[in-house]
Image: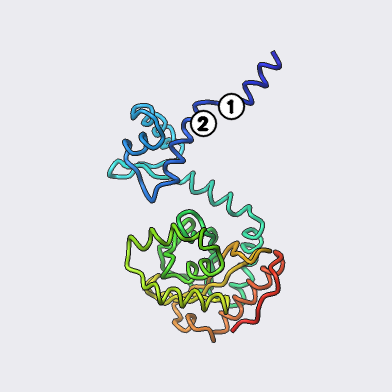
Amino acid sequence: MDRTHKKRKRRGIQSIDTGIRLLEALENSDGPLALKDLSAQSELDPSSAHRYLASFVRCGLVRQEADSRYDFGPLALQIGLAAMRRLEPVQLAEQALPELVGETGYTALLAVWSNRGPTVVRWQRGRDPLVTNLGLGSVLPVSRSAVGTVLVAFLPAAVTADVLTAETRRETIDRDAFERAVERARKTRLAFADSSVIPGLAAVASPVLDWNGDAAAAVALLSPDRELSRASHPAAAALRELCDRLSKDFGARQLKAAA
C-alpha cells in the first residue's frame, strides 16, 4: 500500500498537468487568445479547455476579456512577481530603493527582463507624488524607455531579440538611434528617456549586474524635472553609484570608469 502511494505521488495529478498546457499556451503568446486558439495550441478539445479556463478564471490565474479572449489574471501576476523578487539580486536591489529615494527625492522603480520585456517589479514613491498609469507588472517599451535601453545594453542579444522584434512589428523604431543609445549605455551604465514614454516624466536608468556582467535588473528614477534626462544631473550620478555598488556585491567584474 505504501509503494502504491509513492507511485501515485511520483506520477502526479494528470488534470493539473493538462491544465498547465493552457497556461503555457498563454505564456508563449504575445497577448490574449481566443478559446479556439488556446484549445488548438494546448491540444485540448474546446469543451475541455473551456472547463479548465472557467476554473482558472474563478481563482484569478486567468481573466476573460470583454471580447471573450483569455489572458493571465491577477493571481498569475502576483505569483510571477513574487518569484522574480525572490531572486537575490532583485531582493537586495529592492531593499536599496528607499536609500536612493531618500537621497534624490525622486520616485524609483525596479525592473527585470521578462518574456514580455522590461517589467516593473517594485515601485518606491518619492517626495512628490506622480500621476502615471505605471504600476507593478507594467511592461515598458524596449526601444523608447531608459530601462529597456539599459537592459538591452547588458543582456545577450539572444535574450532580448524576440521581444524587440515583436515591438518592431507593433511600431516604427529608429534602429540607428536606438543602437547609439544602447552603445552609450554600455559605456556609461546610464540610459535616459524624455517625456515621450511616460507623459510629463523624464527618466534615467542604470543596470544591476551579476558576476557574468549581465543585467539582473535595472533601477530607474522618474521625475517631472526634464533635467533628469541629462547625464550631468546629480541624481543620475547617485543612481549609477548605487547600482555599481550592488553590482560589485553580486560579483560583477571590475567596472570600467564611466565615460
What's the CA distance linking mark 2 and mark 1? 8 Å
> Percent from the top left, x then y, of residue 23?
45, 39
Circle 2 sits in a helix, a strand or a loop, which is it? helix
Q: Depth check: give the residue in front, 8 or 40.
A: 40
At 36% from the left and 69% from the top, the residue drawn is 173
Q: Residue furthest top?
A: 1
Q: Amino acid at mark 2?
A: Asp
> Percent from the top left, x then y, of residue 255?
67, 75
> Percent from the top left, x then y, of residue 121?
53, 58
Colour theme: rainbow
Image quadrant in which the C terminus is located: bottom right
Q: Are marks 2 and 1 in contact (CB under 8 Å)?
A: yes
The residue carrying mark 2 is 17
> Percent from the top left, x then y, of residue 19?
46, 32
Q: Earlier in the sequence, mark 2 or mark 1?
A: 1
Residue 56 relative to residue 232: left or right? left
At 49% from the left and 45% from the top, the residue drawn is 76
Q: Depth check: give the residue in front, 237 or 6.
A: 6
Q: Is residue 223 visible?
A: no
Circle 1 sits in a helix, a strand or a loop, which is it? loop
Q: Depth check: give the residue in front, 32 or 85.
A: 32
Q: Which mark is residue 12?
A: 1
Residue 207 relative to residue 71: left or right? right
Q: Residue furthest bottom?
A: 232
